[in-house]
Amino acid sequence: MKKHLILFCALFLYANVHAQNPKIDKLEMLFSQKHYKRVYRKANRLLDNPEYDFSMMPTYYKSLSLFQLAQNKYWFGRHDQALVDAKRLFLKVKNSENGQKIFNAHMYEIAWLKEDLISWASDLKRMGEGNKFNEVQKVIEQTFGEFNLAVLPDEHSHSDESIVVHTEVGTVRSDIIKEAKRYIGVPYIWAGASPKGFDCSGFTSYVLSKSGKELPRRSSDQYSSSNKIKQKDVQPGDLVFFSNGQGISHVGIVVSEKGSPLTMIHASSSKGIIITNVEQSTYWSKRLKGFGTYVN
């Protein structure tokens, strides 16, 4: 009788933890809102709660929050084992009995996390932090290498003919867009800044330099030094910036006209230089930070 009671309690706990759970739902919501420190703290508390001994979800969200927090240099300075711990916890979930089901149900989060880490690695390489870059690159390969995450789940790309720019021929803005479209299909390369391969800010700085505009090399510096504009005033040739919650992490060149769905040409880590409708992409629309221009 005692054995049956213990088995019943175990199954009850398992069913409740794996069913819809408000505390797990809260972790998912906070993570999507980029409240990574809160996710980290709440996941730790759940891991200390015996009711969650049968669930891998607190471990999963602790891992993801550590990956994101590690990108903050101040936080990482106080938690220098964050990447090691994040990878260990992620692989623990992966190798668990329900790991594949968890990853299948959260493939968006995993794909987005990989994109953020690739942007971080590119920034590290550009800044000459070779040892840190190698560490992050190795973690990306070891953690996500077996996943078929070559493309973000909602990354919508378009051919260069699908976006029509109505600016007058010969203007600076039309010249920027024409130059940018020349490189559609060029691959993404960490810290790349030439037609052999670009990263996001390498692409924007290279393209705008052809129109006599000198930009800083990093996306965060491009944002800081640009003239800020509101979305309603954005025109083709302006820049659109994104943040992963740890600062500016991506930049693209606006190709859409005023009043049209916000569309950019940019260096995607999965597909190289492409045109993407920001408003149709959950990943990019959630990370939209602001707009800046170098065009008078």
Image (tube, helix red, strand yellow):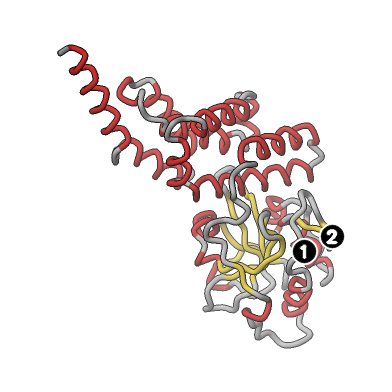
Q: Quadrant of residue 138?
A: top right
Q: Nearer the viewer, residue 157 or 227?
A: 157
Are the residues tagged 2 and 1 within 8 Å (C-beta)? yes
Q: Amino acid at mark 2?
A: Lys
Which residue sits at x=70%, y=53%? Answer: 219
Q: Quadrant of residue 23?
A: top left
Q: Amino acid at mark 1?
A: Val
**What secondary structure is marked by label 2?**
loop
| Lateral position of residue 135 relative to residue 58, left or right | right
Which residue sits at x=47%, y=30%? Answer: 96
Which residue sits at x=41%, y=34%? Answer: 57
Q: Residue 277: horizontal and vertical position, in percent?
A: 56, 69
**Residue indicated by mark 2:** 196
Is residue 72 shown above or below 263? above
| Lateral position of residue 41 relative to residue 248, left or right | left
**What secondary structure is marked by label 1?**
loop
**Residue indicated by mark 1:** 186
Q: Quadrant of the C terminus?
A: bottom right
Q: Nearer the viewer, residue 294 or 139?
A: 139
Q: Residue 167: horizontal and vertical position, in percent?
A: 68, 84
Q: Quadrant of the N terminus?
A: top left
